[in-house]
Image: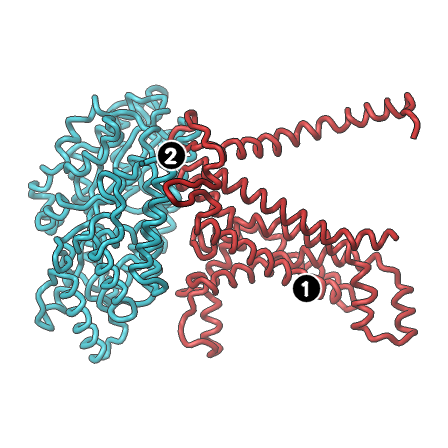
């Protein structure tokens, strides 16, 4: 508790402290950067940015941003659309590239070659209308966490398909409950009505071979038998192997259930690994990580996530800001972040670095997951992505809750996507 | 009436002179933003680039293309938000009016500690809405909220209730919090009216031996009606543009989304200035309509008093 308060005090005091520090406080540009909101993410960013400031004789100030990413997006939209120069460097989500592109500086000339050494899906994601709008900083992909000890105890292999997962989860959950562990559940994921649900749904539907709702040429493909099958499968979990409360779970809530030892399987982002292996974690050394299961005919699909650094078009110190991005996305800084915070590097070469692999053994085994991660339909939706995602998670939420059948939910989703297409003049 | 005298003309001029600053301010803070919103609602502007957009006429409101209808008036989400807003306004304002009158009658009576009660009554109204909304959201939390803990402790419920999760409960919870918060406002206005009522009427009623309930409906209610009408229209206008409580307690959840929350989502989250402005203008129209209907309904009442 005390630690949390100290971090809070630190976060509040930070911009002030930083503004006055540095050897060249009187000269050089003052670059403000918005990265992370708290915890390890903020610490790593602050330390690296300060190092850059010392080396170059500039100053940096960390801008405090809301922890919720949708609030952060609203803040950025308001600042950028009023052409404010308050923030020079912004940390943006992979799905924001298209939505914020018009406000971001073109980094192609300075950092184009570096981005080419990163995961191709991320590089593609950031080239909006032949402009490089952001440099990927760390990559995320949905993965399946499982309890090694429980699977071994009951003699199961890690599941390859969703049907296997359902079967194993039910078997272990029932056996554990009979053994007196009545808070045990089979599978937890992110079922709250928010962006995280869109990621989960995309993984189900895509791994059943049901596409990504909006094809690359903006064809609306939501209504198909595979998508219906995937949603039916997911809806069947609620109340059987998944608690009803999952309808309000985000990443941290599902991690809470898994890390206290009350779930056999969990879908989450890789950051949960470092925490599950923490010293006070009840499931330390009992956790395995594998690629997500797939449907009867599809292939495993992990939603592509991650954060990237962009430079505001309205920055008064564009050169220095780009230099800061160059430093923060360098192999050296990415390696440090991978080792200390389990942030997956975007430079593919770092997955062959021994120190990185030693700190995060699953990086090597999951490399294909990252490489083949399925992007959310952000590129095709462009500035309309938030609307598309909102429609996707609302439709799926209704199915999980039992209010709608997959068919009627996908029908409504098709109708809403059609409305978005009309307003965006896609046709 | 004869032609205006020089004195009257000069008085008219100075009246305009005195009114000018206020009219200027009104034009700047009300007319200009309103006009701009209506203007944007006729365009396809987005926050991606606010400097370039096309006029699309009434396309954001209603449009027919390729055999189907588009625009807010056919958008199920907007219609749902309209329904939510109307339900919220009707239920919350009715409850607040009834409870407000009852509370005003109680604190108007000669009870010991009346002054303290009048002050305490105003506390919910004095707390900033965002603060009280956040407090209530925590109190109603299904996992660690005190409301569930109390109900559970008293043995009234078996498991935690997701107050803000389910659709009917969430709307009921929001209405309950709004009633808690704004009943004091109605009570205050009614109390002020009650204090001006002549005592003689009540003495006469008592002498005639008329039942107190009948006194209330035949004497008190008609006399406080003008004040009550003002309180209700204030509350109605407030409730129709409800934003803060809903946004803080349940965010952009479709099941409790009001028209203002819809407009914010379109404008900020979706960066769709044209559509969001159309939603705002639609809300403006609906509030105007509701107000006109309300005033028309009250008119016979006012005339009755004059005759």
| Residue B285 seen in the current view | yes
Q: Is residue B235 above or below residue A87?
A: below
Residue B281 location in percent, x, y? Answer: 54, 40
Circle 1 or circle 2, nearest the eye: 1
Q: Which residue is mark 1?
A: B98
**Chain identifier of the red chain:** B
- Specify how the rendered protein is coloured: by chain
Q: Which residue is mark 2?
A: A17
Q: Is residue A121 above or below residue A106?
A: below
Residue A155 location in percent, x, y? Answer: 8, 71
State the quadrant of the N terminus of chain A: bottom left
Q: Label 1 lies in what chain?
A: B
In the displayed orientation, state which residue is furthest to the front. Answer: B67
Q: Give the side of residue B172 with respect to residue B65, left or right.
A: right
In the displayed orientation, state which residue is furthest to the top. Answer: A27
Residue A334 location in percent, x, y? Answer: 18, 37
Pointer 1 with pointer 2, Cβ within 8 A = no
Q: Is residue B4 above or below residue A268?
A: above
Q: Label 2 lies in what chain?
A: A
Q: Give the side of residue A402 with respect to residue B252, left or right.
A: left
Residue drawn 55% across the image and 44% down it:
B283
Residue drawn 28% across the image and 43% down it:
A41
**Chain identifier of the cyan chain:** A
| Residue A7 seen in the current view | no
């Amino acid at each position: 508790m005390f630690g949390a308060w100290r971090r809070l005090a630190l976060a509040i005091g930070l911009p002030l402290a930083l503004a006055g520090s540095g050897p060249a406080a009187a000269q050089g540009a003052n670059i403000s950067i918005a990265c992370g909101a708290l915890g390890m993410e903020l610490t790593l960013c602050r330390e690296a940015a300060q190092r850059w400031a010392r080396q170059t004789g500039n100053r940096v100030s960390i801008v405090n941003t809301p922890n919720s990413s949708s609030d952060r997006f609203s803040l950025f939209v308001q600042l950028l659309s009023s052409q404010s120069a308050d923030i020079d460097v912004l940390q943006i989500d992979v799905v924001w590239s298209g939505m914020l592109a018009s406000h971001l500086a073109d980094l192609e000339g300075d950092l184009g070659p570096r981005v080419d050494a990163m995961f191709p899906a991320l590089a593609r994601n950031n080239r909006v209308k032949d402009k490089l709008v952001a440099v990927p900083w760390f990559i995320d992909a949905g993965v399946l966490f499982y309890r090694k000890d429980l699977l071994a105890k009951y003699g199961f292999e890690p599941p390859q398909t969703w049907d296997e997962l359902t079967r194993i989860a039910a078997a272990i959950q029932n056996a554990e409950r009979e053994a007196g562990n009545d808070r045990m559940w089979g599978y937890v994921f992110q079922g709250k009505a928010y962006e995280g649900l869109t990621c989960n749904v995309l993984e189900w539907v895509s791994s059943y071979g049901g596409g990504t709702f909006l094809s690359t040429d903006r064809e609306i493909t939501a209504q198909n038998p595979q998508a219906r099958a995937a949603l039916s499968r997911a809806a069947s979990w609620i109340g059987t192997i998944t608690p009803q409360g999952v309808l309000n779970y985000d990443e941290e809530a599902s991690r809470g259930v898994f890390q206290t030892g009350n779930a056999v399987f969990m879908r989450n982002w890789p950051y949960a690994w470092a925490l599950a292996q923490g010293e006070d974690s009840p499931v330390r050394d009992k956790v395995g990580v594998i690629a997500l299961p797939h449907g009867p005919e599809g292939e495993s699909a992990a939603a592509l996530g991650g954060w990237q650094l962009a430079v505001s078009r309205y920055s008064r110190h564009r050169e220095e800001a780009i230099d800061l991005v160059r430093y923060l996305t360098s192999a050296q800084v990415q390696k440090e972040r991978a080792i200390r915070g389990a942030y997956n590097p975007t430079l593919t070469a770092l997955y062959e670095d021994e120190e990185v692999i030693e700190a995060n053994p699953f990086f090597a085994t999951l490399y294909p997951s990252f490489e083949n991660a399925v992007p959310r339909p952000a590129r095709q939706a462009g500035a309309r992505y938030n609307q598309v995602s909102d429609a996707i998670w609302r439709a799926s939420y209704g199915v999980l809750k039992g209010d709608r059948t997959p068919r009627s939910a996908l029908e409504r989703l098709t109708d809403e996507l059609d409305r978005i297409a009309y307003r965006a003049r896609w046709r | 009436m004869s032609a205006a005298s020089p004195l009257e003309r000069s008085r008219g001029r100075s009246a305009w002179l005195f009114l000018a600053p206020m009219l200027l301010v009104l034009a700047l803070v009300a007319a200009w933003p309103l006009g701009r919103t209506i203007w944007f609602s006729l365009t396809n502007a987005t926050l991606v680039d606010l400097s370039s957009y096309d006029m699309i006429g009434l396309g954001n409101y209603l449009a027919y293309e390729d055999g189907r209808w588009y625009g807010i008036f056919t958008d199920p989400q907007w219609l749902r938000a309209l329904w939510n807003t109307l339900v919220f306004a009707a239920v919350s304002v009715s409850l607040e009016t009834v409870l407000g009158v009852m509370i005003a009658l109680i604190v108007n009576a000669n009870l010991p500690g009346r002054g303290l009660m009048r002050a305490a009554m105003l506390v919910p109204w004095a707390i900033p809405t965002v603060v009280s909304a956040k407090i209530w959201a925590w109190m109603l939390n299904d996992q660690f909220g005190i409301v569930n803990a109390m109900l559970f402790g008293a043995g009234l419920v078996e498991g935690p209730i997701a107050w803000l999760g389910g659709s009917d409960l969430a709307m009921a919870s929001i209405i309950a919090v709004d009633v808690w918060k704004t009943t004091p406002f109605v009570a205050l206005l009614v109390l002020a009216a009650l204090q001006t009522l002549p005592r003689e009427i009540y003495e006469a009623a008592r002498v005639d031996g008329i039942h107190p309930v009948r006194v209330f409906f035949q004497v008190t209610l008609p006399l406080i009606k003008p004040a009550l009408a003002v309180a209700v229209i204030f509350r109605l206008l407030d409730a129709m543009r409800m934003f803060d409580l809903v946004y803080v307690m349940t965010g952009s959840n479709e099941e409790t989304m009001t028209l203002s929350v819809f407009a914010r989502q379109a404008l900020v989250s979706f960066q769709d200035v044209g559509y969001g402005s159309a939603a705002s203008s639609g809300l403006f129209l609906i509030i105007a309509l509701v107000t006109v209907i309300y005033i028309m309904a009250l008119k016979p009442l006012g005339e009755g008093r004059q005759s």
